[in-house]
Image (cartoon, rainbow, N blue to C red):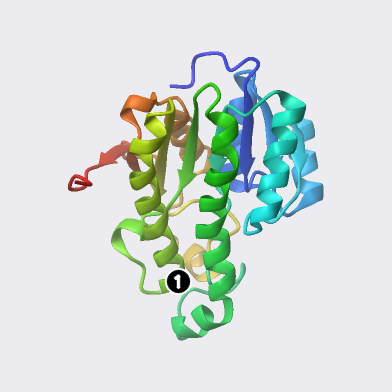
Amino acid sequence: MGGSSLEGKIALVTGGAGGIGEALVARLARRGAHVVVVDVDEDRAAAVAADVGGSSISFDVADRSAWDTASARIADERGGIDLVALNAGVMSRPKGVDMAGDDPLHWMAERYELVRSVNLDGVAYGVMATVPHLAKGGGAICVTSSMAGLMGQAEDPAYTMTKHGVIGLVRSLAPTLAEQGISIGTVCPAGVDTSMVPPDFRAAGYSFAPPDHIAETLEMILDTPADDSGAIWVSMGVDQPVWRYEFAPLR
């Protein structure tokens, strides 16, 4: 996995300033890709990009016009886009707030628009904006979903809804994109050791996979040929193999 050179390839990674995104940036850069780090944290995105000799751009993935402008700019400056990782995401509860102990509908009401716009619109807009540039010579898209998108998560209904939506979008887009030589797939992690982990979950002693473990699966998805597009990969933890989730056929 991840052995072939990506020299000359242009990769775009959203949520690239930390966690899974930062780990994927490092992986792709080690293989020779020029990585464009996208994040709302402009300073941190610039620092991550500088570490790997890449570049950065800061915009809100929930802003469709920003997506169009950024994608066109990157393609114009770099001669196209080859790899896209749509990884940015948020939970209903702000970082640092316990998952248990209050009404999940409270946070759904408070942050529904944010969660929906980042997790779902940010993926849809990313596909719409980058595919015209990928389609010139094929390419690959990977998306970060969650086990909440397969099993549900009572503590965070809005987050769960968006992750179900991401999976449906990936599976439904795959046949159309494959006709253009573009592959797309998604990974569904369980707990990952990032700043999004609620404090009470961390205090309870749960096991969390390192971000690089999930980034490795995203890298695998980007290496998948278009004729095997639309796969949903499950990554429960470092002590379990990554496996492909099988649904009923789309038709």
In the visual, does 241 lie left or right of 204? left
| Residue 23 point in image, percent of width and height | 59, 37
Q: Is residue 250 left or right of residue 85?
A: left
User: In percent of the image, x 52 and y 66: which residue is there?
Assistant: 116
How far across and down, in percent of the image, does residue 214 sit? 47, 40
Depth check: 174 or 199 in front?
A: 174
- Helix, strand or loop for disc 1: helix
To which quarter of the image does residue 206 belong? bottom left
Residue 41 location (% of width, % of height): 75, 53
Q: Quadrant of residue 5?
A: top right
Q: Is residue 48 left or right of residue 185?
A: right
Residue 193 visible from this viewpoint: no
Image quadrant for the N terminus? top left
Q: Camera-side residue: 138 or 231? A: 138
- Check disc 1 and report the residue beneath it: 158
Residue drawn at x 38%, y 29% as measured from the top left:
179
Going 69% across and 54% down the picture, which residue do you hit? 65
